[in-house]
Image (spheres, rainbow, N blue to C red):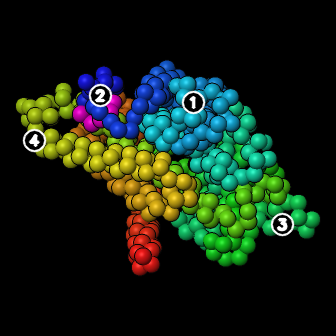
């Protein structure tokens, strides 16, 4: 006997387990979380999305409402919630010990469905994990109460105007003062999501010589010498994309994340979750676009037939459906594997796979967005009405393709990592 269906019954508009089909991954707590997040977003987000987009910002009061609803703790923690955070509210009343990578997937699936609210949390979801995984207990105890309560916000600052995906060659410097009590930071970062309204910047800096070994991670509070200005991007203003400048910014040495010279590996571990999280968003974006295109195809008549009665239109849906379902299956497989591995082994074994998954997610997004736009016709170019969500999705696709590593760089990384694992396996086999 299958479970009752949830959400839309249109083909491929929801993950297969939403339709009530059997699943090896999702349990009662995942369903409880799904129901709670969708209900909260439908009540607090859906009625206001259009006005927020028009205003170019989400009201600050919403962030505090999100904290009270229990959204911030799971967003900050990813695929596991520390037991010490049990005193914070968690949406769906999920216990920290229950939380896993599939709760993370469900959370982001539903947040992305709600549209504009997802962009509010990007800084937290990529900026908090280095603090959680690598920082001193003193720094964690100081910062997490501020950002989990919604009092302050955090973002990640890695990308630079001249470096881009080439993290090894970033140029922002952090030099110790003569008394050894502070770092003095100088440099620039660009395309920093949520930077305009952040109070803390989780920043990759150069504390040593050239290359990866000279990079460290430093948490920089907004203070004298920190300057931010908006960067208009194709997806719109709600993500508060930022050009960030550091001019002789003094940062206490206690704000170093882990040890000097460990920043590159910390960044790479962080990228794995960021790339996976991009795939989560791509999946729901594709499903939302297909839902709206299907609704249109069922009622729109052309050449004396409804669109859905045209074989060429059914062919489009069939090709979109098979790609989205394949992407869902691959994503769930990676989530499952990561849940069985330590962070170190997950990065070693699945870093290249996650890079290729992120590439595939972007490619599927591009295909689905274009096909849905064609089905909608002129409505797919319109920012209001029945094609509005498809127009917004089509416009947002580059935001899935470029961040987290460009396609060509990620494909090459995936191959290099696969070859590295092959050589390690052959070496181990030769010793048997």
Query: Which comes sooner in the sequence, label 1 or label 3?
Result: 1
Task: Identify residue for label 4.
Answer: 311
Measure the C-alpha gap from mark 2 to mark 3. 58 Å
Which residue is depicted at the point 62% across and 48% down? 129
Residue 239 seen in render? no
Q: Which mark is residue 20?
A: 2
In the rendered image, residue 281, in percent from the top left (x then y), is placed at 43, 43
Report the side of 129 relative to 415 (left or right).
right
In the rendered image, residue 297, in percent from the top left (x then y), is placed at 20, 33
Please say if the residues under marks 1 and 4 sit with CB atoms less than 8 Å apart. Answer: no
Query: Which comes sooner in the sequence, label 1 or label 4?
Result: 1
Confirm whether the magenta stretch covers residue 6.
Answer: no
What's the magenta bit mostly, secondary-structure-wise? loop
Q: Which of pointers 1 and 4 indicates the residue nearer the eye?
A: 1
Measure the C-alpha gap from mark 1 to mark 3. 42 Å
Please say if the residues under marks 2 and 1 sit with CB atoms less than 8 Å apart. Answer: no
Measure the C-alpha gap from mark 4 to mark 3. 67 Å
Please give the range of residues in magenta: 11-20
Which residue is depicted at the point 76% across and 65% down? 174
Instruction: Report the number of discs.
Output: 4
**Label 2 SS:** loop
Please say if the residues under marks 1 and 3 sit with CB atoms less than 8 Å apart. Answer: no
Q: Which mark is residue 95?
A: 1
Query: Which comes sooner in the sequence, label 2 or label 3?
Result: 2
Q: Which mark is residue 176?
A: 3
In the rendered image, residue 401, in percent from the top left (x then y), is placed at 42, 55
Report the side of 307 relative to 162 (left or right).
left
């Amino acid at each position: 006997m299958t479970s009752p269906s949830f959400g839309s019954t249109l083909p491929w508009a929801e993950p297969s387990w939403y339709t009530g089909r059997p699943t090896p991954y999702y349990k009662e707590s995942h369903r409880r979380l799904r129901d709670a997040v969708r209900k909260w977003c439908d009540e607090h987000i859906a009625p206001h999305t259009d006005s927020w987009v028009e205003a170019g910002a989400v009201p600050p009061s919403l962030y505090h409402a999100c904290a009270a609803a229990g959204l911030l703790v799971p967003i900050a923690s990813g695929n596991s919630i520390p037991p010490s955070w049990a005193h914070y509210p968690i949406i769906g009343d999920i216990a920290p010990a229950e939380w896993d990578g599939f709760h993370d997937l469900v959370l982001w699936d539903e947040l992305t469905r709600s549209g504009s609210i997802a962009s509010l949390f990007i800084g937290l979801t990529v900026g908090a994990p280095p603090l959680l995984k690598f920082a001193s207990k003193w720094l964690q105890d100081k910062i997490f109460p501020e950002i989990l309560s919604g009092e302050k916000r955090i973002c990640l600052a890695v990308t630079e105007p001249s470096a881009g995906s080439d993290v090894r060659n970033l140029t922002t410097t952090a030099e110790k003062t003569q008394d050894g009590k502070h770092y003095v930071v100088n440099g620039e970062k660009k395309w920093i999501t949520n930077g305009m309204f952040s109070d803390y910047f989780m920043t990759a800096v150069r504390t040593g010589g050239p290359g990866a070994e000279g990079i460290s991670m430093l948490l920089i509070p907004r203070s004298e010498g920190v300057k931010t200005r908006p960067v208009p991007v194709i997806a719109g203003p709600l993500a508060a994309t930022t050009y960030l400048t550091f001019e002789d910014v003094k940062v206490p040495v206690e704000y170093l994340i882990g040890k000097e010279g460990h920043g590159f590996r910390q960044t790479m571990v962080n990228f794995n979750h960021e790339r996976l999280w991009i795939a989560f968003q791509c999946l729901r974006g594709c499903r939302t676009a297909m839902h709206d295109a299907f609704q249109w195809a069922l009622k729109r008549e052309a050449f004396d037939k409804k669109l859905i009665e045209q074989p060429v239109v059914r062919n489009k849906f069939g090709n979109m459906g098979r790609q989205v379902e394949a992407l869902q299956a691959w994503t769930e497989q990676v989530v499952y594997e990561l849940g069985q591995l330590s962070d170190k082994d997950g990065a070693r074994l699945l870093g290249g796979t996650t890079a290729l998954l992120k590439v595939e997610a972007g490619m599927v997004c591009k295909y689905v967005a274009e096909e849905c736009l064609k089905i909608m016709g002129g409505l797919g170019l319109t920012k209001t009405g029945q094609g509005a969500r498809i127009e917004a999705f089509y416009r947002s696709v580059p935001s899935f393709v470029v961040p987290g590593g460009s396609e060509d760089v990620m494909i090459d990384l995936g191959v290099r990592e696969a070859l590295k694992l092959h050589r390690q396996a052959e070496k181990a086999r030769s010793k048997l």
